[in-house]
Image (cartoon, rainbow, N blue to C red):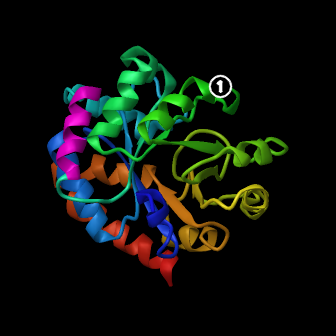
């Protein structure tokens, strides 16, 4: 069983997102194993980028902090290799197509795999263009994660039929960020995926409270939270490990009750 399959095999999965290198990579290396201990079933690591089109202001600012701290893709690969010596938690990179192309697609994916990354999420790569990366991901044993949004509608079945690892269900339109309520019909999206392929579905974009997580976990196999955690990193800086882990325990508890 792959690490990603394992993440969804123990009930509802909680998947936190952090920006690698925010506030610096030393903290990231402490944070990832601690988050796994606190109940994270998989962790998304954002690669800081100067133009993160899918992100709201919270993650944009985290990217700027990480870049200002000197974070680079090569340094992230080195950090992930060290993290892998401490924890077996599944790890996914969240990044954009431009940094991958600039770095060199094959070199990027090979280095990601060798450092211990399990999956790659590229929110600005349309489904129709995934063959740019999919053969390379397959070659190095990395799952290229498919995203579906409320607007995907008739494309959901096609996307799901070729998906691997898990399907990332975008809960609401627009960029990432905390929302008071989530209005799209998640149940229908998940049903369409499951009718096409029996893969885990995880919901992200906008979830921040235990109440939201509990409600949405009724429809999906996992909950993804980014901005609410990145806000804690912004607030506490180098002392963020404990507050983030407290938040993870609270959210994990909400979706397992």
What residue is rendered at 75% in x and 64% in y? 187
Q: Which residue is mark 1?
A: 129
* Vertical arrangement, residue 67 with respect to residue 227, above or below: above
* Vertical arrangement, residue 242 with respect to residue 53, above or below: below
* Vertical arrangement, residue 206 with respect to residue 98, above or below: below
Relative image position of residue 84 (x, y in whole percent)? 23, 51
Is residue 118 at all visible to an observer of this figure? yes
* Vertical arrangement, residue 160 with respect to residue 216, above or below: above
Total marks placed: 1
Q: Picture quarter containing residue 1?
A: bottom left
Q: Is residue 83 magenta?
A: yes
Q: Nearer the viewer, residue 210 or 3?
A: 3
Relative image position of residue 203 (x, y in whole percent)? 59, 57
Q: Nearer the viewer, residue 236 or 219?
A: 219
Relative image position of residue 21 (x, y in whole percent)? 25, 38
Q: Nearer the viewer, residue 254 or 109?
A: 109
Residue 40 shown left or right of residue 101 in the figure: left
Which segment did they paint magenta? 72-84
Badge 1: residue crowd in 10 Å (few <14, some 14–19, many ≥20): few
**Majority secondary structure of magenta residues:** helix
What residue is rendered at 44% in x and 49% in y? 227
Residue at the far front: name it. Answer: 139
Q: Is residue 123 magenta?
A: no
What residue is rendered at 46% in x and 34% in y? 139
Residue 54 shown left or right of residue 114 in the figure: right
Is residue 23 at all visible to an observer of this figure? no
Secondary structure of residue under mark 1:
helix
What residue is rendered at 68% in x and 62% in y? 198
């Amino acid at each position: 069983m792959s690490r990603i399959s394992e993440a969804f095999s123990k009930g509802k999965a909680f998947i936190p997102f952090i920006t690698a290198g925010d506030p610096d990579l030393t903290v990231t290396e402490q944070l990832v194993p601690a988050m796994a201990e606190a109940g994270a079933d998989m962790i998304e690591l954002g690669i800081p980028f100067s133009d993160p089109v899918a992100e709201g202001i919270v993650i944009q600012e985290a990217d700027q902090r990480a870049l200002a701290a000197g974070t680079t893709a090569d340094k992230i690969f080195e950090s992930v290799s060290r993290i892998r010596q401490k924890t077996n938690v599944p790890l996914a990179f969240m990044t954009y197509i431009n940094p991958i192309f600039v770095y060199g697609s094959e070199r990027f994916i090979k280095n990601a795999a060798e450092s211990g990354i399990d999956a790659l999420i590229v929110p600005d790569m349309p489904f129709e263009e995934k063959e740019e990366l999919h053969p390379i991901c397959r070659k190095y044993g990395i799952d290229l994660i498919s995203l579906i949004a409320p607007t995907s509608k008739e494309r959901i079945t096609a996307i799901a039929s070729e998906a691997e690892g898990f399907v990332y269900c975008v809960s609401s339109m627009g960029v990432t960020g905390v929302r008071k309520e989530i209005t799209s019909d998640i149940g229908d999206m998940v049903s369409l995926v499951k009718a096409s392929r029996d893969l885990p579905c995880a919901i992200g974009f906008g979830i921040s409270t235990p109440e939201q997580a509990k409600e949405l976990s009724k429809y999906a196999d996992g909950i993804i939270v980014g901005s609410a955690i990145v806000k804690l990193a912004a607030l506490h800086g180098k002392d963020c490990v404990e507050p983030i882990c407290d938040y993870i325990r609270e959210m994990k508890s909400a979706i397992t009750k």
